[in-house]
Image (cartoon, rainbow, N blue to C red):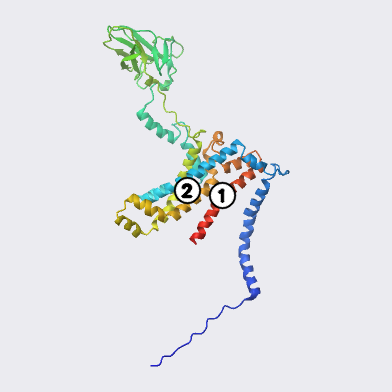
Amino acid sequence: MAQSVTAEPPAKAPPDVGDAGRWREYALALGFLAPALFFLGVWVVYPAIRTIVRSFFSDSGNRFVWFDNYKTLFTDQTLLTAIKNNAIWVGVVPALVTAIGLIFAVLIERISWSLAFKTAVFMPMAVSAFAAGITWRLVYQQNPDQGALNAGIRSVKDAFSPPGVLSNATPSTTNLVSKGGGIVLQTPLRPGQTARLGLTGIAPDDVPSGAVQAAKPQPRSGEITGVVWRDFKPGGGKTGVVEQGEKGLPGVTVELKQNGKNVESATTEDNGTFAFTDVKPGTYQAAIGAGTFAKPFGGYSWLGSKLITPSVIIAYIWIWAGFSMVVIAAGLAAIPRDVLEAARTDGASEWQVFRRVTVPLLAPVLTVVFVTMLINVLKVFDIVIAVAPESTQSDANVLALALWRTAFSGSAQFGVGSAIAVFIFILVIPVLLLNIRRFRREA
């Protein structure tokens, strides 16, 4: 049976548009790119070149100073602090943000209320860093009545070490002396005698609740009795004497000492009286225990010079942890589940699956988050100026903040400011090259 053969027509070569046609294509492309190139040149290229040139001139701009501005950058103590702090930011923040985001991304796959959790963690990204900084500045207030963080610490600390009922009280007479945190009556006591322990420096609001008129102690055989009272009478009075209008101090721990050792202890009544019963013959001393004068928790100085940089870093991580979590969670969702199940079937534990399968497969996503945070921390500015008070901004200083304070915050050191800007640009270049290389490898 004969077979017919049909020849296909040869493929036509694209028409040669010639040099004129190619130039028209180039002109059309250039026409579309021209606006973007114009604005790129005006807002990026020209300012960058102008800043580099300006960094070699004096602050007034009329004298060429070579590398003097760069010498200032590495000799001025304030700017060296900024460089040191930026190094801390680079070494700590990108790794922490990436690690926290990874942990959150893995956890939200295992909880039923993941949507609420993701919303709560990502919410800080919805507000500006400056607004978030103001919020954290309020959280960091040292007074526990104002700062939420110190208020939480105080509630835990007071549970284990409660403050004294009279933390600000002082002796009212000279025969009462402060010793070992407490107050000791120097007058020796024997059974059948009384002790008067008057205190002053107590505000009316600090008097313990339930306090009533102080009672004069009555001597009793075989006992040492006494009174602890607020030795202050409005309008004038006599110190060391219980008078009408002076209140007793309830809840005060009184110790009976002999040869420097505690023999017995008692707690004062609402009228301030106390009694030690069945006291053996001998000489004793009465003392108010140190716990009565224990100072309340005054709060940590989170905005002070020693803690300001860690405090700002915590606020920054709080903002960016949501971004890291969302990006890593998207990468985690793209991982083939059969690979994870195969690892579990082969006997791998959850930790081994996470460390040897999940993390390696997420390496490209983790790199994106890490590099993004590297670029961000090199130019961090707004969160620092929002959290750090004026008194500790020099201690929390970073390069971007130093640039603003040097050039635009009254100093008008435009030469040094330009040098700082160039230095930041130089630091960012290796990170940008790393990012470009990663893009080309993934393309």
Residue plotted at (53% across, 57% down):
437
Q: Which mark is residue 40?
A: none
Quadrant housing the N terminus: bottom left
Front-most of 144 and 248? 144
Quadrant of the rendered image containing residue 72? top right
Q: Quick check: can you spot residue 108?
A: no
Apparent side of residue 286 relative to residue 21 in the rendered image (left or right): left
Front-most of 108 and 386? 108
Apparent side of residue 239 relative to residue 265 in the rendered image (left or right): right
Which residue extends farthest right? 62
Q: Which residue corresponds to mark 1? A: 428
Secondary element type, mark 2 = helix
Q: Which residue corresponds to mark 2? A: 125
Q: Is residue 240 above or below residue 409?
A: above
Secondary element type, mark 1 = helix
Q: Mark 1 is on which residue type? A: Val
Q: Mark 2 is on which residue type? A: Met
Is disc 2 surrounded by few (<14), some (14 to 19) or many (20+) residues within 10 Å?
A: some
Residue 394 percent across, percent down from the top left: 57, 36
Residue plotted at (30% across, 56% down):
346
Residue 326 percent across, percent down from the top left: 43, 52
